[in-house]
């Protein structure tokens, strides 16, 4: 009896501490224009940055179209929410997502690479001042020039649902109750 009175509060305390843990946000995205389809998942911090957006900390997905392939890395922005200029490739980027605004990426956008066979390409997907989006590409095979690949009027960004904290807590409590009930059955001797 004494062990049960110690174990259940300890498990409840652990479950409640897990309920308060922050998790990164995930957003699916899809951009289609000019024979290109860029789709996948943005992983972001859960804390608004200095420009009221979320820092993109990871990206997965694919680019379908000439020079495309599997998205294999996000190019880190050393300036946080402030734009960075990559003079070698000719890109300006900040890797900030605004999921609740009409334009989900600003005019600096997100910079990432793809790999297809032996070809690595660098891509910049960004929002225009007029609310549209543009995709730029840099491939070593095209003479080292960043090209405008396509322009689209929209980019679909949708939050990937995570289990609700209360649902996780209730599930944990149900598990504790089940284990406690099972133990009581085993100790009852007729």
Image (cartoon, helix red, strand yellow):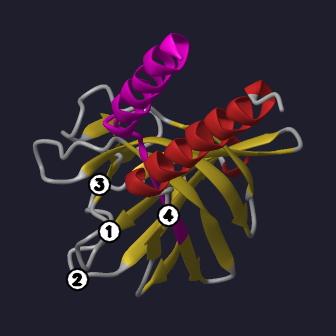
Q: Give the distance between the C-alpha atoms of the residues marked 3 and 4, in whole angstroms.
A: 27 Å
Magenta segment: does it hold 7? yes
**Residue 28 at x, y = what percent?**
53, 65
Q: Are marks 4 and 2 in contact (CB under 8 Å)?
A: no
Q: Give the distance between the C-alpha atoms of the residues marked 3 and 1, in whole angstroms.
A: 11 Å
Kindly give the residue lying farthest to the bottom in the view shown. Answer: 153
Q: Which mark is residue 130?
A: 2
Q: Residue 31's image quarter?
A: bottom right
Is tag 2's residue or tag 1's residue first in the polypeptide sequence? 1
Q: Does residue 61 appear to the left or right of 100 in the view shown?
A: right
Q: Which residues are magenta?
A: 1-29
The residue at which mark 3 appears reads as 108
* Main secondary structure type of the part rendered in magenta: helix
Q: Which residue is depicted at the point 57% across and 37% down? A: 176
Q: Give the distance between the C-alpha atoms of the residues marked 4 and 2, in whole angstroms.
A: 30 Å
The residue at which mark 1 appears reads as 104
Q: For mark 4, does the 10 Å Cα neighbourhood hold few (<14), some (14 to 19), or many (20 or more) residues?
A: few
The residue at which mark 4 appears reads as 161
């Amino acid at each position: 009896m004494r062990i049960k009175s110690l174990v259940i509060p300890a498990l409840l305390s652990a479950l409640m501490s897990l309920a308060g843990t922050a998790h990164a946000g995930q957003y699916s995205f899809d951009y289609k224009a000019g024979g290109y389809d860029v789709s996948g998942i943005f992983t972001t911090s859960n804390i608004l940055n200095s420009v009221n957006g979320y820092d993109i900390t990871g990206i997965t997905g694919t680019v379908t179209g000439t020079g495309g392939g599997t998205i294999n890395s996000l190019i880190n922005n050393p300036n946080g929410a402030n734009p960075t200029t990559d003079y070698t490739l000719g890109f300006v980027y900040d890797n900030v997502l605004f999921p609740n605004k009409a334009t989900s990426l600003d005019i600096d956008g997100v910079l990432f690479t793809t790999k297809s066979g032996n070809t690595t390409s660098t891509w910049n997907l960004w929002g225009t001042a007029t609310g549209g989006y543009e995709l730029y590409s840099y491939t070593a095979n095209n003479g080292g020039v960043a090209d405008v690949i396509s322009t689209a009027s929209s980019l679909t960004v949708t939050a990937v649902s995570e289990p609700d904290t209360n649902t996780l807590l209730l599930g944990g409590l149900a598990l504790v109750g089940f284990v406690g009930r099972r133990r009581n059955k085993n100790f009852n001797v007729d």
